Image: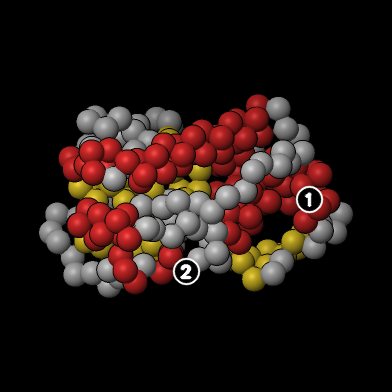
Amino acid sequence: MAYAKADAPVALQYPCERCPLRDRPGFRDFSEDELAFMSRFKRGELVAAAGTLIFEEGTEGAHLYTILSGWGIRHKQLSDGRRQILNFVLPGDFIGLQASLGGAMDHSVEALTDVLLCVFERDRFTELFDVCPSLAFDLTWLSALEHRLLDGNLLSVGRRTAVERVAYLILLLYRRARARGLAEDDRVVFPFTQQHMADALGMSLVHTNKTLARLRDRGVVSWTRNRFRIHDEERLAALAEWEPAEERPRPFL
């Protein structure tokens, strides 16, 4: 297993002024003061190849990251190798703060695809609160959103039926990808396997495969390899017992 390293400054491919996320429809842009702060706060960029551990459970990291491009997973693993995927991470997601600020990581983050990361120094994190409180508020909002996503995942694992679980996960990831400009109309590429879905839903691979087939047979989704098409988003939401939430442009760091 490869590990991401950000020990030396990396030349910027995307200075904050040219950040590709600023043009995505689902994100809130920076004010001039916020942009100036982020240009000073960002230390560099890091490329993590698919399969790289960006964070490893039980280790301490000196950096925090924003995903500029690519997909990853946050997960915990038991001693016998069983894995629970806690969440999928997409462009615009801020990773590393889910653990204690000064302690070891209690989960791992792995790149599913090649990932480009913005690098920030963990020990400068409090500057957000001292210098740019509007971004500190955004970070608090993102933390609250993360908790809401985890609540939905816990409800799936604990109480939703298999069909409801799979429908919820597909719809959640489709809508998150669409807000980041990663979906085209009713089509989206999910760069993960059915085993990843099973590990996120607490189901066996066989059960996940059969449940996906049931959704396909009902005419709500179809797929070829990892290219999914949502044929009936409204019906998929009904199957998932989706609870509508207020939509607003998502901040990012």
For the question of whether residue 107 can be seen, the reply is no
Residue indicated by mark 2: 23
- Quarter of image, res 203: top right
| Vertical position of residue 223 compared to residue 1: above or below | below
User: Within 10 angstroms of label 1, few (less than 14), some, or many (20 or more) residues?
Assistant: many
Q: Is 248 placed left or right of 222 in the picture?
A: left
What residue lies at 46% left-to-right and 42% top-to-bottom?
142
How far across and down, in percent of the image, does residue 41 sit? Answer: 22, 53
Residue indicated by mark 1: 236
Mark earlier in primary sequence (2, 1): 2
How far across and down, in percent of the image, does residue 79 sit? Answer: 39, 30
Q: Is 96 placed left or right of 245 in the picture?
A: left
| Vertical position of residue 169 compared to residue 129: above or below | below
Residue 66 versus residue 127: which sits nearer the camera? 127
Residue 158 versus residue 181: which sits nearer the camera? 181
What residue lies at 61% left-to-right and 61% top-to-bottom?
178
- Quarter of image, res 200: top right
